[in-house]
Image (cartoon, coloured by chain):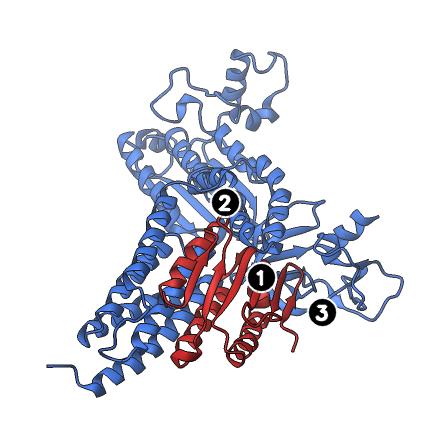
Amino acid sequence: MGIPEDLVQQFRSVALQRLERIESSWASVLSSLDDEAAVLIHREIHTLKGESRLVGFTDVNMVCHKLEDLLEVARARGYAVDEDFDLAVNMALRFMAMLVRKKIGAQLQGIDLPGFIKQIDALLVDARAEQRMPRSTTGGMLAMLRKDAATVRVPSALRSRLAPIAIDSFVEYAATKGTRRDRLRVSWHSLRDLIGVQRAVIGAGQLAKHRANALTLARELGKELEVVFEIETAEVTTDMLAAIDAAVLHLVRNAVDHGIESPATRAAAGKHSVGKIHLTCGVRGDKLVVVVQDDGRGILIDEVVARAIELGLVAPNEAARDKWFDLVCRPGFTTRTEASDLSGRGVGLDVVRGAISNIGGTVSASTSNNAGTTWTVEVPLPELTIAGHVLRVQHVPFPLVIDEAWRLTETSPGAPVIDVALRLGLTEDAAGEPPRYLTNGKLTVGIVSDRAPQPAQARRLVAVAPPSFAEIVTLDTVEGLLIHPERMVTLAR
Amino acid sequence: MDLAIRDLDFEAKVELADPAHPRLELAGNADGAIVAHFAGLIVDLHTKLVESHARTITVDIRALEFMNAACFNVFVNWLGVITELPSDQRYRLDFDANPAILWQKRSLKTLACFATDLVGIGGS
């Protein structure tokens, strides 16, 4: 018995609507990595596959299967697909639309379903192989590095040197059309993943393990310990999180091992038998401040100096008491003649200071005999979000952002004029239109822009230090450049 | 009616002087910036071809380095419009492709699956 015609008609109508939704959602996923659209696509295709089977459109059902395979590959690539792939998905949708429209019982006149499936299969084979093997030399090497970006930590000095190159890479990618654009996108994204700002959250969840470790260690050492962690959540970079994590590891371990005394010693010194370590971590102004405080014996400065003399680090007659902090932070320094399994190995404080220094932070300490030691780690918080204005400039195929400190002002004929498109080499002709003048209170510049600046929040993507006049940011999901007009003017002089 | 597009790096040119051998030549990069113009050109060209009772048109894409999905969909739509014509008005799209440009081969082979009787691929 055949399928009732009205049911078939209903299927056709609904299926064509589904295909339209899938097509527009696919475009949305590719342009803005819209997660909801991605979910909708998978759901719609799955439903269409089931419905087509029910009404006997086996050809549609078959293409649905292939489309699902394509989308699975796309999803595995984070929807970073090339034009061939995009076209294949689009053609599969159009092919299905054609199959849905054809009259029931009509022959597939001129339609080569097996051939179409074969083409999709060939693309899938290549796409899957490509997932295993990078396809171009440049993109390939970077892609391989990119694959490891989550585990490879690029030194900050190298990152600083690569950042201006990343800007060139981004601009070239954004401005290029054609097949080269795909290759440039792979290169740019690989570079971005290697040196871009990797955000992380520091909070109780990330540092709690150190509290548990401290209590375990205290038990092993026969010490009684109370550990209090007060941690505010803050957005940091992954570098910062790693450095602070290392610092807390060593400082807490040192406090348990060196600072906190045994219950008997504490009792003899008139202290409570239970030692205390208090850690606070939070934002103070523009810094993240971590304080590790113990109420132990304190650092015996005379002992530190004596050991330093013994190790030949200071001269016997040198006034070295003021240098105690630098001495205890020297690689390999320990006041112990026999290393315990723990911090006595002389590895720790130098690591803390080095790690924190690498992210632009400082470590300081104060100590008091029999009252304990307080270590303070201060790290400048990265400005990850920038309140600014977005500009649109002719010939510049991405948004430009300027810090909100710049405001529109009246026409200033003597002010320097910045033509960003010209400056970036995106055009060879100076803009004919008059600039818009902006001032930050100290400097007034004219910027050639199609539209008046609009407020925007930009997220820093690749930070670039002066004298570079630009950084790479994202506005929602769109990548653009944050420009520093004052640097552009300085460089132009 | 000017059946031509001259963009920065894309060019489309139609030759209808010889009614028996109409040609569409595409060159450069066809991306999102020209898709609307390209679709408009194909609509106008289709009208001309139907009026002139053309049986085939040569689409020379040997110098077309790149065509994005949106532009290529114009070909798919074009083919769809041709298939809906009465059989005596239908005409073929004979593509003259560049074998050195890999996307052309793959995309055209897939396109031909929509209507094997209306798509020819030469040069590859």
Residue B102 location, x and y as percent? 46, 50
Residue at mark 3: chain: A
Task: Using the image as rendered, state which of residue B51 and residue A29 is in the foreground.
Answer: B51
Front residue (pair A362, A467): A467
Amino acid type, callout 2: Ser
Question: Alpha carbon of mark 1 to alpha carbon of mark 3: how far?
Answer: 32 Å
- Where the N terminus of chain A falls, by quadrant? bottom left
Question: In the rendered image, which quarter is residue A460 located in?
Answer: bottom right
**Residue picked out by circle 3:** A450
Residue found at the far left of this picture:
A1
| Distance Cα–Cα, label 3 vs label 2 | 32 Å
For image coordinates 38% across by 78% down, the residue present is: B87
Kindly identify the amino acid type of the residue bearing the numbered disc 3: Asp
> Which mark is in front, 2 or 1?
1
Label placed on residue B26: 1
* Residue A181 pos. (x, y %): 55, 52
Q: Residues within 10 Å of mark 1 (few under 14, many from 20)?
A: many
Count residues near mark 3 (Cα–Cα under 10 Å), then give few for <14, some for 14-19, many for 20+: some
Q: Chain B is drawn in which colour?
A: red
Q: Where is residue A137 in the image (x, y as percent from the top left)?
A: 50, 38
Q: Which amino acid does label 1 sit on?
A: Leu
Q: How many angstroms separate mark 2 from mark 1 (CA)?
A: 33 Å
Q: Do the residues labelled 1 and 3 touch (CB within 8 Å)?
A: no
Mark positioned earlier in the residue sequence (3 or 2): 2
Give the left or right position of residue B107, taking residue A39 as reference.
right
**Residue holding disc 2:** A190
Q: Colour of chain A?
A: blue
